[in-house]
Amino acid sequence: MWLTAWMPRTIVALHAHPDDESSKGAATIARYHDLGMRTVLITATGGEAGEILNPEAETDAARTDLAAVRRYELREAARIIGYDDVVMLGYRDSGMPGSDDNRHPDALVNSPFDEILERLVSIVRSERPQVILGYDDHEWYPHPDHLRIHDLSMAVFDAAADPARYPDSGDPWAADRLYAPVFSLRRLRLLSEAMESRGMESPFSRWIERIGLDAVDPPLTIVEIGPYVERARDALRAHRTQIDPNGPWFQIPLDIILSVYPHEDFELLASRDGADPEGFDLFD
Ligand SMILES: [Zn+2]
């Protein structure tokens, strides 16, 4: 008789700042959570360098200790999405390119790469995920922390599986796949066209201009998330200091999203199981 050990399916998502988990791949995480998979969020920084972007959230608490308020917002957003666990690594937000925050000694970009990597390796080895979410190379949004997360996600996928690396940080674990949530041009264009055809201004038209008309998407894995769109939007709204509920993100009518593009897009960055880069599921 064969006994098959029950193996929980787990996804570990690595993000740079509080609110990134709600704007990138949140509906997909909500879907997998509801399917019974274990979902773990790692947030590298506290988002201290962010500004208060919502006039209604300009409280004394937010002005004096933005990091504390953002921690609270992150917990709430993660609860709404359905993350089973949240790990905050506690590095300092490195700020936008060229800002003074870049030089802070505690900034994620100034913290030793090997030390951060070892912490990530140890989480991956104890959670044993089949799927890791990281970042792509962020060609058109070169936030230093996002670039750092790209480098770290590529590195942890390899290092966690390598018995020679960090032997004191748990038994090696080879995740099957590493994906990055991406805003595909296809999605931006379809949503923009649908809004403009209703005489609305699209929040994406400036992005599309910046990216360039001849830009093309990488091969994409497209996850169906229609029933989870609202939940992801609620999670984003939980980041009250960062998200103006009257801002452009919420101007896209729900029925347009549901009829035009009820999907989230992912780029396959690495795989050990021969995953199809143009699939429809992150696990299968
Ligand atoms: Zn970010």
Image: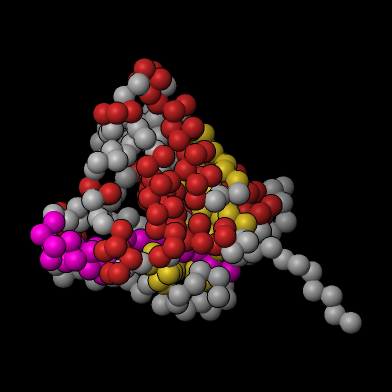
- Quarter occupied by the C terminus: bottom right
Q: Quadrant of residue 37?
A: bottom right
Foreground of the two, 230 or 15: 230
Q: Which residues are magenta?
A: 176-200
Q: Compared to 234, does 266 lie above or below?
A: below
Report whether 193 appears left or right of 67.
left
Q: Is residue 244 magenta?
A: no
- The picture places residue 19, in percent across and down from the top left corner, at 40, 43
Q: Residue furthest front?
A: 255
- The picture places residue 47, in percent across and down from the top left corner, at 40, 35
Foreground of the two, 27 or 179: 27
Q: Quadrant of residue 87?
A: top right
Q: Compared to 209, does 216 lie above or below?
A: below
Report whether 32 appears left or right of 239.
right
Q: Compared to 71, does 178 lie above or below?
A: below
Q: Compared to 263, does 92 lie above or below?
A: above
Foreground of the two, 81 or 99: 81
Residue at image coords 79%, 69%: 5
- The picture places residue 166, in percent across and down from the top left corner, at 66, 50
